[in-house]
Amino acid sequence: MDLVLKNKRVLVTGSSRGIGFEIAKHFLQEGAKVIISSRGQEQLAQAESKLIAEYGKENVLASTCDFSNIDDVNILFKYIKKRYCGLDIVVSNIGNGCSTLDPIPNKQHWKKVWDINFETGLNTARIFLPILEESSGSLLFI
């Protein structure tokens, strides 16, 4: 099925493994140029190697980024804007389902989950939305 994604510029956050990695693969299968990102450099390098082997170096770029750190997000934004002159799709795929044995978690636990699951997506939207608007692009939250 042609989803009209050929040569679309796509950023997938949290994509060194799991759901994010599979999302990146599906965009690549449709012909998109994909930027994968993660905090962990070693896992990200492994993911990049796998994707390059299957889809080619010209279609895959990996960049470490901690999306809870606004400075990191700004650096990635500037790099992508310079290299690709824009983006068409951003997939915000960062989250943590960490649980606790306590039926009513303490405030510190709630804050940690909130920061990971909500604030990182908010940082992503704040930074990347203007560039997506330029290309009538899309921002997806997983």
Image: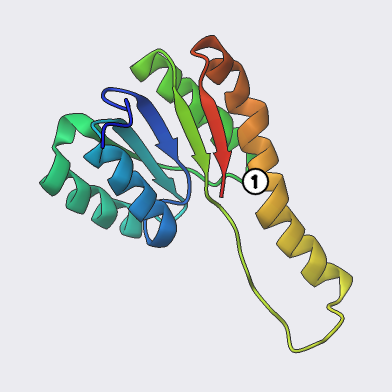
Q: Residue at x 13, y 47 (%)?
A: 54
What residue is shown with label 1?
Answer: 120
Within 10 Å of disc 1 (Cα), the crowding (few <14, some 14-19, many 20+) is many
Please name whichever residue, 41 or 138, is drawn nearer the observer in this view of the structure.
Answer: 138
From the viewer's perspective, is residue 67 above or below residue 9? Answer: below
16 on left or right of 47: right
Please name whichever residue, 51 or 106, is drawn nearer the observer in this view of the structure.
Answer: 51
Which percent across, then down, holds residue 96? 61, 64
From the viewer's perspective, is residue 115 above or below residue 120? Answer: below
From the viewer's perspective, is residue 68 above or below residue 133? Answer: below
- Picture quarter containing residue 3? top left
Which percent across, then down, holds residue 140? 55, 38
Please name whichever residue, 100 or 73, is drawn nearer the observer in this view of the structure.
Answer: 100
Q: Please say which color scheme the image uses.
A: rainbow
Which percent across, then down, holds residue 114? 75, 57
Q: Residue at x 32, y 25 (%)?
A: 4
62 on left or right of 88: left
Farthest residue in the bottom direction? 101
- Picture quarter containing residue 56? top left
Q: Secondary structure at mark 1?
A: helix
